[in-house]
Image: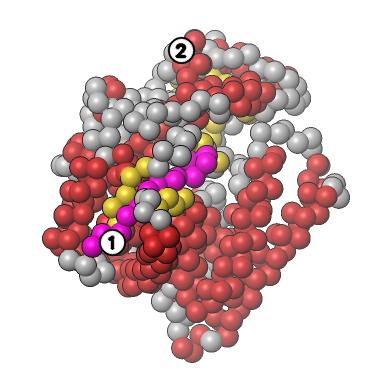
Amino acid sequence: MSHYTRPIAISKKIRAQGVKGPKYTIWNGSNEEIKNMTFKAEEIVMDINNHDFIPRVLPHYLKWMSLYGKTFTYWFGRTPRICILDSNQVKQILSNRTGIYPKVDPHPLSVLLGKGLVLSNGDQWARHRQVVNPAFHMDKLKMMTKSMAKCAQSMVEKWTEIITKAETESNQPVEMEVSSHFLEMTADVISHTAFGSNYMKGKEVFLAQKEQQMLLFKFLLKVPFPGYKYLPTKDNLYKRKLDKTVNDMLMQIINERFEKKECGYGNDLLGLMLEACMQGGEENRLSMEELIDESKTFFFAGHETTSHLLTWTMFLLGTNKEWQEKLREEVIRECGHDVPTGDVLNKLKLMNMVLLEALRLYGPVVNLRRQALQDLELGDIKVPKGTVLAIPVAILHRDKELWGPDADKFSPVRFENGVNKAAKHPNALLAFSIGPRSCIGQNFAMLEAKIVVSLILQRFSFNISPNYVHAPIELITLQPKFGLQMNIKRLE
Ligand code: HEM
């Protein structure tokens, strides 16, 4: 079947089962419609107490759900997608261990991450996960909390300096855009914890990776014609140069570690990964290219996600003063004004509940996707091979049938008895996904977030500035479009 007739044949197969959706448009599928709707939706400005950003971020889902029901089909370019909003089907997909629901291949992010853990599939994924797993064990992470605390301390010291200076100049509350501070701090944390003594070089890699990401955004909704990437266009040449810079620098860092291996590979993520890699049998070892892809993955997967979790948590604490007070009391009760250690962090129950609620309402990952490896059956749907199963996490996270009538409200108490009892389905919270491909860095991210929020609460009180515009946007991860402006006051 040709490029042109295959989508039409698949569309017929899906529709014949009563799964409806927008019509297939040759080559672009539904992309133009998505682009137009999201472009228009970006004009929506929300009230700061309204957490339902779906009309802004996923307007196409909202429209198609109202027209075609919860299970509908649409097209991303020439790839068919089916939207899955049934928790049992979601679990069936994400918990499957047989490999019939792999990650989408080719994936638009593969230019950034190669075949690292986030995008690889099958045996290759299993081999990578085995090598990377030991680096994320809780005992290893607890050792990394020192580095995390150091970076967080340096950020709050900077805040103190800025605020003290501004306070002496005027009596007004001091306004700061905090999301950029979190981006810088989480980049520092991942550079230190992933690359230890090589962290300066690590940061250079990180900056080049950011450039790659910007280029990627430019082309995300465009469907390129075959072979386009090989043309010597300005963007393609720049992209190749960036790819080479990132790969060369990472190779240099990794080679240096191999050269100094008599002193151990190091206690950072890279060192722990190299150690696990060299301890395993020859057949399990990762090649240089694979080690490079995995190093890129640490940055990509661990940086913006954690930073945005911090931003949205500050937003929610800024709009809910009594929770801000409750958390401050908890932190002071458990560790006074000291930097919390790994054991203290474990005792911060309210903090944990607030972070989980932030992940529910403003989880940085808005969508999860898997692709049918073969023709298969999911509940009563016959899914043709190659179809992408789209799981709109953000919609599921505010489903009233799952979370109750207050699903749109900020209510950390729902997590009082743990994640599994917070909703009608034990796997309703999908912020870190579930199953074998769930986030390997979730404990890392939660430890980091707890340290940073604790240090902030010990030193400052804060609320949302009237200049803040509530406009969440999905740029790979969910973030405030215009940053988060907060009024911050030093505590005596
Ligand atoms: C708040 C912070 C974070 C959030 C919300 C988050 C979310 C997620 C989600 C939803 C997935 C599954 C993606 C999918 O199935 O397509 C994932 C996978 C992954 N995450 Fe995270 N993540 C966070 C922090 C981190 C950190 C700090 C690291 C590492 C330093 C990390 C590394 C990874 C890796 C390597 C995977 C792929 C795992 C696999 O497929 O085996 N993440 N993350």
Q: Is residue 148 above or below residue 172?
A: below
The residue positioned farthest toward the left in the image shown: 333
> In the depicted view, which residue is nearer to us: 131 or 42?
42
Residue 414 in the image: state x and y as whole percent.
20, 36
> In the depicted view, which residue is nearer to us: 73 or 473?
473
Q: CA separation, marks 2 and 1?
A: 47 Å
The residue positioned farthest toward the right in the image shown: 232
Instruction: State which region is magenta.
Output: 477-492
Residue 47 in the image: state x and y as whole percent.
40, 28
Question: From this viewpoint, is residue 324 visible?
Answer: yes
Image point 36% across, 28% down: which residue?
A: 50
Q: How is the image coloured?
A: secondary structure
Image point 66% across, 53% down: which residue?
A: 212
Residue 18 circle label? none
* Dot 1 crowding, Cα within 10 Å, few <14, some 14–19, many 20+: some
Q: Amino acid at mark 1?
A: Arg
Image point 54% across, 64% down: which residue?
A: 295
**Residue position marked by numbered label 1 in the rendering:** 459
* Dot 2 crowding, Cα within 10 Å, few <14, some 14–19, many 20+: few
User: Reading the chain from its start, which is encountered first: label 2 or label 1?
Assistant: 2
- Report if residue 177 lies within the magenta region: no
37 sits to left or right of 237: left
Q: The N terminus appears in which quarter of the rendering?
A: top right
**Residue position marked by numbered label 2 in the rendering:** 66
- Report if residue 491 lies within the magenta region: yes
Q: Secondary structure at mark 2?
A: helix
Q: Amino acid at mark 2?
A: Ser
320 sits to left or right of 385: left
Residue 352 in the image: state x and y as whole percent.
24, 50
